[in-house]
Amino acid sequence: MQQQQQQQPANYDLLAVFTDEAKAEAATSKLHKEGFGEEEVYHLTEGTVGRGLYREHGPNRGRNEYFLQTRRTGPNPIVVVLFAVILGLVLGVLSFAASFALPTLRLQEPVTVLVGVVIGIVLGVIIGMVRRGRVRGAIGQKTSTPPPNARNKSAKTVVALRFIDPENISRKSRARAILLNNQGKIDRSVGQRE
């Protein structure tokens, strides 16, 4: 008798589609264990009922795109100033030492030291600005490519329910929770009264 009911286009109260037959079997056995009878629970092949209107349950699936974004930080002002000061001091000391090491060039000490410091500061600012900042983002979310759709269309991956008392909201909620906890996708087109 159950086979005849499955063949007829029936109005089901709740329908969930699973990724594989084992998960659908687990959900069916859990429903039976929770007191849903054989006349309420139907195990069907995909595509026999429903139009495939699904709602994502759980956290928003689009958020992972935000968390996977990466960007480089701009130059750190402290590092830029540090490079300018260090290179200014180094080139200032080198130009002062050059005035003593090369007396034949007759370099004037205050002017050469000042030119060395200015060149060092400019080089330090350029090097500090060109340095690449840290990469920020990609905080650990994993991207996964969905497996190719190689499902067996004759596999019974759909669990449908027709309640004896469709007005019993707690019973309907309990069945929905069981289907969702077993990783089923609820088809919203089923159970809508037209």
Image: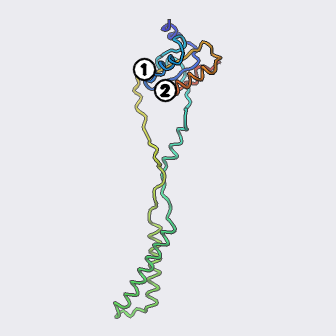
Out of 121 and 162, give the one closest to the viewer. Answer: 162
Instruction: State yes or no: discs 1 and 2 in contact (Cβ < 8 Å).
Output: no
Determine the residue positioned at 43% across, 91% down.
109
Using the image, determine if residue 140 lies above or below residue 28: below
Q: Quadrant of the C terminus?
A: top right
Q: Secondary structure at mark 1?
A: loop
| Residue topped by disc 2 | 182
User: The residue under label 2 is which amino acid type?
Assistant: Asn
Using the image, determine if residue 188 lies above or below residue 88: above
Residue 164: image location, x then y, percent? 60, 12
Determine the residue positioned at 48% across, 57% down.
72
Q: Secondary structure at mark 2?
A: loop
User: The residue under label 1 is which amino acid type?
Assistant: Lys
147 sits to left or right of 182: left
Residue 61: image location, x then y, percent? 52, 38
Determine the residue positioned at 45% across, 84% down.
115
Using the image, determine if residue 68 lies above or below residue 133: above
Out of 170 and 83, give the one closest to the viewer. Answer: 170
Residue 56: image location, x then y, percent? 55, 32
Determine the residue positioned at 43% across, 92% down.
108
Gap in angstroms between the C-alphas marked 1 and 2? 20 Å
| Residue topped by disc 1 | 153
Question: Crowding near pointer 1: few (<14 within 10 Å), some, many (20+)?
Answer: few
Which is more N-terminal, label 2 or label 1? Answer: 1
